[in-house]
Amino acid sequence: MTFKEYKESSSTYTKTHENEEHKDIYSILKENKKNIIISFIIVFGLIFAILMLAGINEVIATLKKTNLWILGLTIIIQIFVYIIWAFRWKLILDKMDQAPNFLNVLGILMTSVFGNNITPGSIGGEPLRAYLLKENHDTPYEVGFASTMADRVFELLPFLLVSIIAVIALISWQLDLVPKLILITLILGTVFIFSIVIYAGINRELSEKIVFKILDSILPVVKKITHKIYNTDNLKEQAKYYIYNFNSSFTMIVENKLFFLGAFLALVTWGLDLLNSYLAFVAIGVTPPIEPFITVFTIAILLSFLPLLPGSLGITEIIMITLFIPVGISANYVLAASVVERIASYILPTILGLIAAIYYGRKIVKSDNYSS
């Protein structure tokens, strides 16, 4: 499949999904306002409970020891993570002949990071990227959205490698049998979900059947719990839309020999994230043993894909505390290191993303006013 053929097929298939083009940052926030508020209430409750159990005074005392030079280094590393990610996405856009300049690609990416960081389950980022590409660069929405799906394809190989490492490490990990089985089950469950996603890149028809069966099984339970009415046909159409885009993206990337370069860049960013987490401990005066640290980090990252809380806040910390205690690192040190790491990986990107969202929002409003 050539890029020209891919764009034409995407355009034809997605005509029925033109309503997705209006997924700007304001509509995303408005549509998910209730979920966002509830999620952050849960997050604050979790963090408060963790702080109380770990000892808030001990955590504060540990944070006062933070080496600001190392904290600065984690911020610089995080900046490189987003630069590499933007370059990775631009590889796809360049091949599609739809790429704005690099600074705009980076700015749009940061806006999507803001959308992901404040919405449960990171549901706001990809549609927002496509919307901003359309409004600022006249990139057809279906092409922009497909480029974000293709960008996610690059993360499949690193994810599978990390999953294998996590399961092998857990088997040899000195944990009680029940916690070990629970963690292995959760990881394998996550791998299973991602395997379905990967298979969508190979066999679209069978993937649709699997997803439809899952929806038919889950929706009645969800309806009973939430007391809401869901349009099953509409959900299935949306599922077909995402599966089609992912399938086309996967085929396009493989046939145009971008997969291994993109996967390598994804591995580099995961490695930099690992380094940042390690430096966060070093910044507060703790030097974790390398092998257990890599194991804990890997497991925590994998399990953080499961919850539907913004940025996996609270969940990642609970997992890391549980797994670091057997290594001899107490909860107050884990929480303090998490705060240091979150400054670079969550707080700063969210602030920069908000600034970018305001910039592009005002730009779009001015453009609409000028057109009218």
Image (cartoon, rainbow, N blue to C red):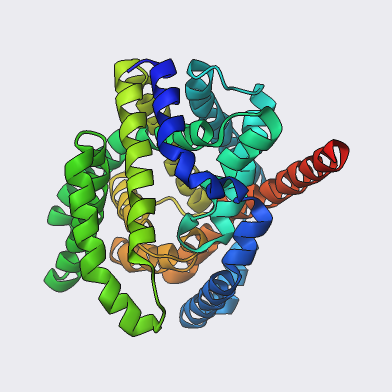
- Vertical position of residue 105 compared to residue 335: above or below: above
Image point (55%, 50%), residue name: 19
Image point (19%, 36%), residue name: 203
- Residue situated in front as seen by the camera: 109 or 1: 1
**Image spot of residue 94 (x, y percent):** 53, 18
- Residue situated in front as seen by the camera: 361 or 172: 361
Relative placement, left or right, of 297 versus 200 is: right
Image point (48%, 46%), residue name: 17
**Image spot of residue 272 (x, y percent):** 47, 36
- Vertical position of residue 101 compared to residue 244: above or below: above
- Residue situated in front as seen by the camera: 305 or 51: 305
**Image spot of residue 51 (x, y percent):** 52, 77
Report if residue 328 is visible in the image: no
Q: How many numbered marks have been drawn onto this rendered protein structure?
A: 0
Report if residue 239 is visible in the image: yes
Q: Please identify the quarter of the rendering in which residue 232 is found.
A: bottom left
Relative placement, left or right, of 277 versus 217 is: right
**Image spot of residue 320 (x, y percent):** 38, 62
- Residue situated in front as seen by the camera: 130 or 66: 130
If the image is split into quadrants, where does the N terminus sit?
top left
Relative placement, left or right, of 358 versus 124 is: right
- Vertical position of residue 58 compared to residue 356: above or below: below
If the image is split into quadrants, where does the C terminus sit?
top right
